[in-house]
């Protein structure tokens, strides 16, 4: 049962000194250190998570050092909980006790759900705004104006639906019917 530390800064210009001092003060003998952006892969975090054993405590300076997003943080929390590893966040005041851990998990789950709903709401609002500006979504309509004219012309000349399909390479009778309907032509033969 050891205290294992994880420290991360987002760029080479930032320093780990303050985090390392705080982690050592919490009794961390082993500290994994990372100096990369949180968006990229974090090999030291992966090593740290692999290194942890049941009964250990992962100590971080602040939760934002651990996860790239709320969803990512929740995944890490869940992994630690399943492996019976406590989590301490010095700046966030989380001590790793089971009561605090349960409260944090509940709170973080609620926040993750909130984050998902906010993202969905923003996407929906963005789509509505784009539609108002004339943006089209979905696949491009397969309507070929030339073919519509050709279908109506051939049909008016007395050609059968099947013959029109073969001549124009249209695979579906319903497409022919739809094209004729677009030209307000009433069907009187097959």
Image: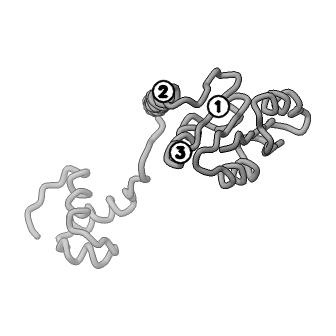
Residue 132 visible in the picture: no
- Quarter of the image with the N terminus in it: top right
First-in-chain label (2 vs 1): 1
Circles 2 and 1, Cβ within 8 Å, touching? The answer is no
Q: In the image, which disc is placed on residue 48?
A: none
Determine which residue is flagged by label 1: 88
Alpha-carbon neighbours of circle 1 within 10 Å: few (<14), some, or many (≥20)? many
Q: Is residue 52 above or below residue 110?
A: below
Tell me residue 93's x, y (percent): 64, 21
Farthest residue, direction left: 188
Q: Nearer the viewer, residue 160 or 22?
A: 22
The residue drawn where x is 73% and y is 29% is: 61
Q: Is residue 82 above or below residue 126?
A: below
Alpha-carbon neighbours of circle 2 within 10 Å: few (<14), some, or many (≥20)? few
Determine which residue is flagged by label 2: 99
Q: In the image, which disc is placed on residue 84?
A: 3
Numbered disc 1: secondary structure? strand
Separation of disc 3 and disc 1 at Cα? 13 Å
Q: Is residue 111 above or below residue 84?
A: above
């Amino acid at each position: 049962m050891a205290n294992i530390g994880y420290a991360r800064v987002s760029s080479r210009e930032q320093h780990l000194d303050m985090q390392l001092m705080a982690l050592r003060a919490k009794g961390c003998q082993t500290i994994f250190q990372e100096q990369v952006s949180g968006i990229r892969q974090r090999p030291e975090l992966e090593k740290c998570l692999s290194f942890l054993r049941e009964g250990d405590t992962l100590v971080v300076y602040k939760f934002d050092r651990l996860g790239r997003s709320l969803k990512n943080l929740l995944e890490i929390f869940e992994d630690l909980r399943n492996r019976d590893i406590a989590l301490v966040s010095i700046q966030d005041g989380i001590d790793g006790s089971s009561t605090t851990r349960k409260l944090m998990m509940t709170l973080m789950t609620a926040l993750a759900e909130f984050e998902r709903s906010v993202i969905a709401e923003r996407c929906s609002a963005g789509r509505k705004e784009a539609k108002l500006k004339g943006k089209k979504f979905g696949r491009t309509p397969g309507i070929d104006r030339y073919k519509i004219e050709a279908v109506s012309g051939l049909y008016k000349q007395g050609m059968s639906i099947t013959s029109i399909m073969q001549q124009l390479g249209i695979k579906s009778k319903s497409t022919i019917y739809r094209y004729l309907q677009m030209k307000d032509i009433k069907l009187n033969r097959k």
